[in-house]
Image: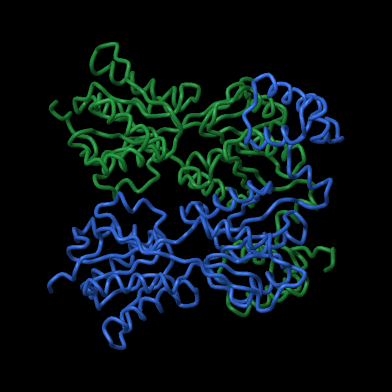
Chain colours: A blue, B green
Amino acid sequence: MSDKTASLKDVAGAAGVSVATVSRLLNGSLTLPEETRKRIEDAIRDLNYRPNPHARRLSRGRSDTIGLVVPDIANPFFATFVAAVEAEADSRNLAVSLFATLNRTGREVAYLELIERKHVDGLIFVTNHADDGQLATHINQVGKVVIADEDVPGADVPKLFCDNEQGGYLAGRHLAAHGHREVLFVGSPQEMISGLRRFDGLRRALREHWGEDIVPASYRGNYTVEFGREAARRFIAEGMPSTAIFATSDEITIGIIEVFREEGISVPGKVSIVGFDDVAPFHLFAPSVTAVRQPVRDIGRRSLALLLETNWQDLASPAPQELMPVEIVVRESVAPPAKR
Amino acid sequence: MSDKTASLKDVAGAAGVSVATVSRLLNGSLTLPEETRKRIEDAIRDLNYRPNPHARRLSRGRSDTIGLVVPDIANPFFATFVAAVEAEADSRNLAVSLFATLNRTGREVAYLELIERKHVDGLIFVTNHADDGQLATHINQVGKVVIADEDVPGADVPKLFCDNEQGGYLAGRHLAAHGHREVLFVGSPQEMISGLRRFDGLRRALREHWGEDIVPASYRGNYTVEFGREAARRFIAEGMPSTAIFATSDEITIGIIEVFREEGISVPGKVSIVGFDDVAPFHLFAPSVTAVRQPVRDIGRRSLALLLETNWQDLASPAPQELMPVEIVVRESVAPPAKR
């Protein structure tokens, strides 16, 4: 095959249509008469045209590709986040290269290096493990990184989180209004801002309602179904010391509900539950699950906008941090505390 | 920064440990004494070592990177598939570049070209729209592609599907055994093998059970929640002409159940439902949903194995096609037909 790359203009000329028409056909945003479409496709074939951001990159010295680094794509929260970034990038004619780190620092660092190698123009970076400083160092070195969802302390780049504290507060206020004072927090360690701020919000709501220096009990672990299951088993083994549980991710919530079902523990008859994320189809569960909803798609879209809009040559220090609003979606998993 | 790249050996030498130890630390597969770990990390920093498959690529003339092309990452089925490929690639020390096509031919073709440009060593390719021949032509041109999940007819490369016909058969047999003869098929068009084969399997089971030339009714559309909702509304508008529905994806199933809930139509009291995929948390739904389960993670793992094991210099024609077994997971959404 020839190394000479035909341009969009060559294709348009050969097909006798405008460049905009070819471009929009390739983007799928235009429906053309069959005959016109065929003429363009023939021209594309004949000229061996490659409608490819990576081809453009070669000619323009930019990749027109955004890198997106997430811990685990099988998690529907991250999958939805990624899809939102993809859609936003597509609308701006950018390609996205996606990398899953499995939460390993070695892989995270490797993907950060892609910026230096010009494989991507910038990175949206999501991690959900605590950092010992190594990640922050690398991020500050490579620049052009937007951190989303979970913090990397010490990294001085733009950051975008959901309003975790407000989310915890909404959960706590809803539970307190139903009469719950002993609420178990199940979530990530205090070293993670999600674990810290959601807990702080819960505590603030409970103190506000009950007028006491309440410190909610907490089980700390990973945002996984398995940790949810562990937490539920521990909760049962400890004699169910709380009347309600604030389960701070979809996966944790699912794990807890699975074990409660197996053990015949009624929700909300025996224990009330408020979840967090609300990406899972909680509305179809039995009972449907009340949860704090993260604006996952908005966070995805806004992350890309931040990456593109930031003036990287003249970045303020500390770099800006944005919080996206959360809401509570009330369903059926909260009721007044069971009589002891 | 220097362009000179330090090797793993340099790092190991500077830290006074073996190459294997450094490598395993970076892979996260080894827990070391704090002091040893720090020594290695200092060496990495001092030498500016980049534990990066893309760096290796530059030195070895291969990318050590697999491309993975899927329609839509927000769909948990694809997300789970991708995660399985990621995990398998990681265990083989390969990187994965993931691309979402949003089901647009222009983007699909662009990503296929990555192979020719040596950005990736090979591609696992998933599409879920019908092809007019354009995709097949490109795939045959670039080679080194494994097609998974849904067919691209005319593409002569290794292919891997779930056993769609058997899945349809299992659903049909389960419904027939409960007394259902009028079963509505809700799924993709006949041009897609999933739509064709799942329907064929359903029909075979119903004919086998009832000894008649039954042709199930069918509504055809996309594997989306929105199409599931449309199908449910049409089903109601047509006076609920079947006693059971075979909903051939998680998303379709969710859409149908949402509308039935809103309209107060009892499952399985009024209509029985069998789903397909079983990636969604159907076990926690009310009622829990009986579904044909795809071995999604196995399909992901096996796709990568096929890509790596195939002798591309000497590929048989037609290229091999593999089917992965499915099973039916029986829960609570099927009961005998309601009295009319």
Residue A195 versus residue B56 in the image, above or below = below
In this view, the residue in front, A235 or A308, is A308
Q: Give the left or right position of residue A80, taking residue A119 as reference.
A: left
**Which quadrant is the C terminus of chain B positioned in?**
top left
- Residue A128 seen by the camera: yes
Q: Is residue A35 left or right of residue B195?
A: right
Q: Toward which corner of the image does residue A122 lie, by quadrant?
A: bottom right
To which quarter of the image does residue B261 belong? Answer: top left
Residue A147 coordinates in the image, percent (x, y): 60, 66
Q: Is residue A107 visible?
A: no
Whole-percent x and y of residue A339? 12, 72
Q: Residue at x 41, y 33 (%)?
A: B325
Quadrant of residue A3 within the rendered picture: top right
Q: Residue A335 placed where, x, y %?
A: 20, 65
Quadrant occupied by the N terminus of chain B: bottom right
On the rendered structure, is A10 left or right of A140?
A: right
Total tally of numbered discs in the picture? 0
Q: Out of B219 and A246, give the one closest to the viewer.
A: B219
Q: Where is residue B246 shown, x and y percent of the image?
A: 32, 30
- Along the viewing direction, whichever of B295 and A69 lies nearer the viewer: A69
Relative to B167, does residue B154 appear above or below in the rendering?
above
